Image (spheres, rainbow, N blue to C red):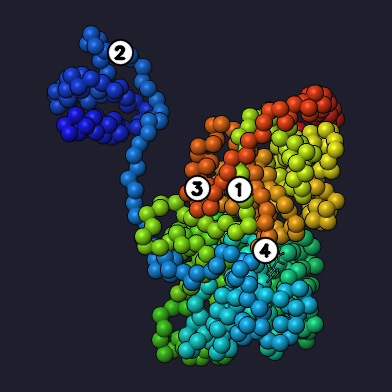
C-alpha cells in the first residue's frame, strides 16, 4: 500500500539522518512539507534544506536538537559460529536426574575412587562424567603425546554455576600426574582472585593427599620469598622443583615468571584456565603471553635434550621427532564467551567444547549469547523504589526469614552503607564483604557466613564469581547488575550442586524493561514478579526512619574523625 510505503520511506529517511551534533531532526511532517524539502534538496545546501518548516512556511526553530535517541531498527544478522562452538558435546543441565555412579565412569583409578567416596562423592555430576574421560583420553598415549601421536585437543567447558566443574579437572589431572617420576610443574591452574585460587588449591590438596604430588599456591597471600621457597630448592647447585601443581592468580604468576629464575614452566603439560571468560578480559591478557614464552623458553643446553620444546607450528616429520611434551589448555566457565575473536586470543588447538547451552546451533538467529542457568534456581524480580529498598531487605530477613542470604550491591560504598543501616536497625546479624577487607578478614567472614553465624552477608562483586559457599538459600541483587555475566555469577552462588535456591533482583521502574529483556535474551528459563505490598513494610517504617537519622549521625562522626572519606 502506497501510504504505508511513504510512511516507511519517511521513517527510513529519519533513520538515515546523520547523528552528528550539528544535524537537524526532521519532525514527523505532513507529506507536503516532506515533498517541499525533497524538491529543494538537490539545489540548496542540505543543512539548510533539512531545516524544519512550520505550516506557515516559517522556520520552526533555530535550535539544534542533540541526541539521536529515536528508536532505530537494527538489522538482525544471523550468527555463524565455527563448528566446534556451534556443535558442542552436550552436558545435561539437570544434575539430580543425571547422576552417574563414580564406578561407571571409565578410566578412574581405584585410589581416586576411594578418595572420592571418602569425601562423600558417590556419583559424578553430568559435567564430570563427560569431561573426566575426555581429559584422560587425551593422555592415553602418555604425557608426551596425544592420541595417534598428535598434539591433544584443547578442551573448553561451559556449564552452569555450581555444576561441579572443579572436580572435572582436578580428578583427571591428579590421576595423570600420579604416574610421574620427577617433580616438575606439570599443571598450572590460573584463577582471577585469591579466594578462588585458595578454593581450587584446597580441592587439589584433598585429592593429592597421601601421594608424593605437591600443590603450591602463588597468589601474593604469602611473601614473594616464601612462595619462592615453596616452589623450588637448590640441591647440588641445581634448582629442583618442589611443585607438581601450581595454583596462581595472574599478577603473582607473571612476577614469578619474570623475577624468579628457578621457576620453570618448561615441563608444563596442562594449563587450566578457570573462570575463563574473566581471564580473557583485557587486563589479564598479557599473563598468557608470558606463560607461553616461559613454556617454550629453552635453556642453552637443551638443543640435544629429548624434552626440547618448540612453539607448535605445522606438523612435519621433523616436528614430530623427538616427541615434545604438548601443552594442553583446559578452559572452564559458566559464561564462556562464544565470541570467536576473544577465544582466538587463547590460541586454542582444535578445541573441543562441552556445553549445556544450545544457543550456538545453526538455526539460532539470536545475536546475544545464551548461557547456562542452574536447574534448581528460581528467579524473581522485585519492583521497588530507591527509598524502599532497605526496608524490603529487612522484610525479607526479619519477616520472611530468607536466610542465609547473600546480598549484592554495585559498589563498596553501597555495601558499607547498607551494612551500617541493617546493623543499626538490629534484629539480624550482618557482615560485609568487599576488597576493603584484608584476605584473612575476607576468609573469616566467608567462614562465619558458611557456618550460619551470619544470616546476611552484604557483598560487592568480590564474592560474585566461583566462590562455593555451602547452603546459601537466597541471593539478593540489591543493586541490579549491569551485565548479564555478573547476574549469572551472582545468582549462581545459590542453587549449587543440584540444590534449590532463589534469587531476587530489586528493580526500579526505569530499570525493569531493559533488565528483564537482558535476562530473557540470555536464556533464563523464567523470571517472575515478586511484589512486596506497602502494608507489609508499614510496621517497620517508624523504626526505620529513626535508624536513618542515627545512621546520618554515625556517618558524620566517622567522617569527622577521618575514618572514612
Ligand atoms: N559429584 C559430586 N557430588 C556431590 N557434590 C559435588 C560433586 N561435584 C561437586 N560437588 C560439590 O558441588 C559444589 C559446586 O562445585 P564447583 O564449585 O566445582 O562448581 P562450579 O561448576 O565450579 O561452579 P562456579 O561456576 O560457580 O565456579 C561444591 O561444593 C562441590 O563440592
Neighbourhood count class around disc 3 (C-alpha, 10 Å): few under 14, some 14–19, many 20 upward: few
Q: CA distance from mark 3 to mark 1?
A: 11 Å
Viewer-proximal residue, 437 or 107?
107
Q: Secondary structure at mark 2?
A: loop
The image quadrant that residue 51 belongs to is: top left
Q: CA distance from mark 4 to mark 1?
A: 17 Å
Q: Position of residue 336 (x, y in %)?
A: 53, 60
Tell me: residue 257, above or below residue 58: below
> Which residue lies at the image location 78% right of the left edge and 86% below the top edge?
236
Mark closest to the chain's N terminus, 2 or 4:
2
Mark closest to the chain's N terminus, 2 or 1:
2
The residue carrying mark 4 has its beta carbon less than 8 Å from ligand 1:
yes
Q: CA distance from mark 2 to mark 3?
A: 43 Å
Residue corresponding to mark 2: 60
Q: CA distance from mark 2 to mark 4?
A: 65 Å
The residue carrying mark 3 has its beta carbon less than 8 Å from ligand 1:
no
Q: Mark 2, mark 4: which one is toward the viewer?
A: 4
Assign the C terminus to one quadrant of the image: top right
Tell me: residue 239, above or below residue 260: below
Viewer-proximal residue, 75 or 377?
377
Amino acid at each position: 500500500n502506497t501510504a504505508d510505503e511513504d510512511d516507511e520511506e519517511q521513517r527510513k529517511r529519519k533513520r538515515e539522518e546523520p547523528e552528528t551534533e550539528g544535524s537537524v531532526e526532521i519532525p514527523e511532517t505532513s507529506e507536503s512539507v516532506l515533498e517541499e524539502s525533497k524538491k529543494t534538496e538537490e539545489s540548496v545546501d542540505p543543512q539548510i534544506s533539512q531545516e524544519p518548516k512550520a505550516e506557515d512556511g516559517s522556520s520552526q526553530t533555530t535550535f539544534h536538537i542533540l541526541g539521536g535517541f529515536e528508536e532505530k531498527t537494527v538489522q538482525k544478522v544471523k550468527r555463524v559460529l565455527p563448528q566446534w562452538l556451534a556443535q558442542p558435546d552436550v552436558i545435561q543441565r539437570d544434575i539430580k536426574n543425571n547422576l552417574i555412579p563414580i564406578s561407571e565412569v571409565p578410566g578412574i583409578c581405584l585410589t581416586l575412587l576411594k578418595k572420592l567416596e571418602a569425601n562423600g562423592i558417590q556419583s559424578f555430576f553430568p559435567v564430570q562424567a563427560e569431561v573426566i574421560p575426555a581429559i584422560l583420553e587425551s593422555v592415553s598415549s602418555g604425557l608426551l603425546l596425544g592420541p595417534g601421536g598428535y598434539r591433544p585437543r584443547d578442551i573448553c567447558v561451559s556449564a552452569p554455576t555450581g555444576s561441579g566443574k572443579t572436580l572435572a579437572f582436578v580428578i583427571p589431572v591428579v590421576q595423570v600426574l600420579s604416574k610421574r617420576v620427577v617433580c616438575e610443574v606439570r599443571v598450572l591452574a590460573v584463577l582471577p582472585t585469591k579466594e578462588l585460587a585458595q578454593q581450587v588449591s584446597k580441592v587439589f590438596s584433598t585429592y593429592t593427599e597421601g601421594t608424593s604430588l605437591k600443590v603450591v599456591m602463588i597468589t601474593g597471600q604469602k611473601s614473594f620469598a616464601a612462595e619462592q621457597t615453596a616452589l623450588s630448592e637448590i640441591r647440588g647447585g641445581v634448582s629442583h622443583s618442589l611443585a607438581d601443581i601450581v595454583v596462581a592468580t595472574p599478577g603473582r604468576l607473571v612476577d614469578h615468571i619474570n623475577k624468579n629464575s628457578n621457576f620453570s614452566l618448561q615441563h608444563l603439560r596442562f594449563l587450566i584456565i578457570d573462570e575463563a571468560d574473566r581471564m580473557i578480559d583485557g587486563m589479564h591478557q598479557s599473563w598468557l603471553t608470558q606463560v607461553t614464552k616461559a613454556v617454550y623458553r629453552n635453556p642453552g643446553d637443551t638443543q640435544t635434550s629429548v624434552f626440547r620444546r618448540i612453539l607448535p607450528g605445522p606438523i612435519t616429520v621433523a616436528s614430530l621427532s623427538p616427541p615434545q611434551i604438548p601443552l594442553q589448555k583446559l578452559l572452564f566457565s559458566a559464561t564462556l564467551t562464544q565470541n570467536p575473536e576473544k577465544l582466538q586470543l587463547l590460541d586454542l588447538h582444535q578445541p573441543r567444547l562441552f556445553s549445556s547451552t544450545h544457543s550456538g546451533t545453526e538455526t539460532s538467529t539470536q545475536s546475544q549469547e545464551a548461557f547456562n542457568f542452574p536447574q534448581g534456581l528460581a528467579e524473581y524480580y522485585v519492583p521497588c523504589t530507591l527509598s524502599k529498598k532497605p526496608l524490603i531487605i529487612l522484610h525479607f530477613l526479619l519477616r520472611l526469614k530468607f536466610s542465609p542470604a547473600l546480598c549484592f550491591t554495585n559498589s563498596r560504598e553501597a555495601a558499607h552503607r547498607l551494612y551500617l543501616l541493617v546493623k543499626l536497625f538490629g534484629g539480624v546479624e550482618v557482615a560485609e564483604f568487599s576488597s576493603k577487607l584484608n584476605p584473612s578478614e575476607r576468609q573469616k567472614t566467608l567462614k562465619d557466613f558458611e557456618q550460619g553465624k551470619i544470616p546476611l552477608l552484604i557483598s560487592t562483586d568480590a564474592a560474585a564469581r566461583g566462590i562455593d559457599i555451602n547452603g546459601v538459600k537466597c541471593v539478593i541483587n540489591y543493586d541490579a547488575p549491569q551485565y548479564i555475566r555478573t547476574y549469572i555469577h551472582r545468582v549462581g552462588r545459590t542453587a549449587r550442586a543440584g540444590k534449590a535456591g532463589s534469587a531476587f533482583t530489586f528493580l526500579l521502574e526505569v530499570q525493569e524493561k531493559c533488565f528483564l529483556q537482558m535476562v530473557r535474551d540470555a536464556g533464563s528459563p523464567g523470571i517472575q514478579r515478586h511484589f512486596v505490598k506497602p502494608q507489609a513494610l508499614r510496621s517497620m517504617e517508624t523504626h526505620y526512619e529513626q535508624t536513618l537519622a542515627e545512621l546520618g549521625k554515625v556517618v558524620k562522626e566517622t567522617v569527622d574523625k577521618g575514618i572514612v572519606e
